[in-house]
Amino acid sequence: MPRGFQYDQCSAVITGASSGLGAEFARQLAPHARTLLLAARRAEALEEVRRELLGIAPALTVIVCPCDVSTDEGRARLIECIDTRDVRPNLLINNAGVGDYGLVSSADPARLQGQIDLNITALVLLAHAMIPRFQKSADAPAAILNVGSLAGALPMPDMAVYAATKSFVISFSEALRVELERDHIIVSCVCPGPTPTNFGKTARRPDGTDTDRGGQGLLRIPPQRVVRAGLDALRHSKACVFPGAGVSLAARLFRLMPRALMRTLLAARFRRSQR
């Protein structure tokens, strides 16, 4: 097993860091890190997180970079910030993501494109840009943590594009892990189930369209546990983790279930939700 990631005096870049899991990653890293670079679209929210982190660790260097990493311009701004502020990173947390509740046929094309641009394109291109910038060695490897989802373990009517993008994240993470192992870069993927963040609010459509939430209560765990599991995955060099006993069991069942049976069960659930 490759040597695990060491958080003491790390320099981390975190996307989607203005709230939810991204802000929680920053909170849990703050006591250990030397530098945290926080990227998200909302400048005021980033400044609030920055003030909170300095209250936790006054000696910490916190850099905020308001940008939209789903765009070429936003990614260029983030990379420029890394280079000009001499961040010297050894950790990338690809947390930024977005969903969309409802049918593909009734979706705004811009929302469909937005999921692909942020959940896939941004994640891949930021990983690619960071690889040559990482500070690393055999004794102190660098790391990439990608945030997937339990949704990536199965096709999900009413969230078809989101689930497919997270399936991509899982597959990409595991392949990249193999490619980068000899370069002393650990790649892990954390795949939470339902988690109380702003995700549901932003995924709901303007007309109020929501998704079937039946059974989610059994799988829900707080952001603190999700983040802890993700950071532990890098610490112990695990390829992919599904935080929480219920989520972990569900992921195993989905992997073992025959696809024909899965489609039948999902079709029945979808029909019930459309009544």
Image: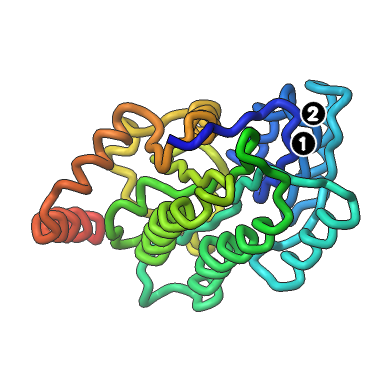
Residue that carries the numbered disc 2 in the rendered image: 52
Can the viewer see residue 210?
Answer: no
Residue that carries the numbered disc 1 in the rendered image: 49
**In the figure, residue 48 lies in which quadrant?**
top right
On the image, the x and y values in percent for residue 159 come to 37, 60
Coloring applied to the structure: rainbow
Residue at x 50%, y 78% (from the top left corner): 109
**Is 108 rendered above or below residue 34?**
below
Residues at marks 1 and 2 touching, judged by CB atoms closer than 8 Å: yes
On the image, the x and y values in percent for residue 169 come to 45, 57
| Secondary structure under the numbered disc 1 in the rendered image | helix
Residue at x 41%, y 47% (from the top left corner): 149
**In the figure, residue 247 lies in which quadrant?**
top left
Q: Which mark is residue 17?
A: none
On the image, the x and y values in percent for residue 5 come to 58, 33
Local packing at callout 2 (Cα closer than 10 Å; few below 14, some 14-19, many 20+) is: some
Q: CA distance from mark 1 to mark 2?
A: 5 Å
Kind of residue indicated by mark 2:
Glu
Horizontal arrangement in the rendering, residue 35 relative to residue 244 (left or right): right
Residue at x 25%, y 34% (from the top left corner): 249
Q: Split into 4 quadrants, where in the image is the N terminus?
A: top left
Horizontal arrangement in the rendering, residue 52 relative to residue 121 (left or right): right
Residue at x 75%, y 39% (from the top left corner): 11
On the image, the x and y values in percent for residue 184 come to 58, 45
How many numbered marks does the figure carry? 2
| Secondary structure under the numbered disc 2 in the rendered image | helix
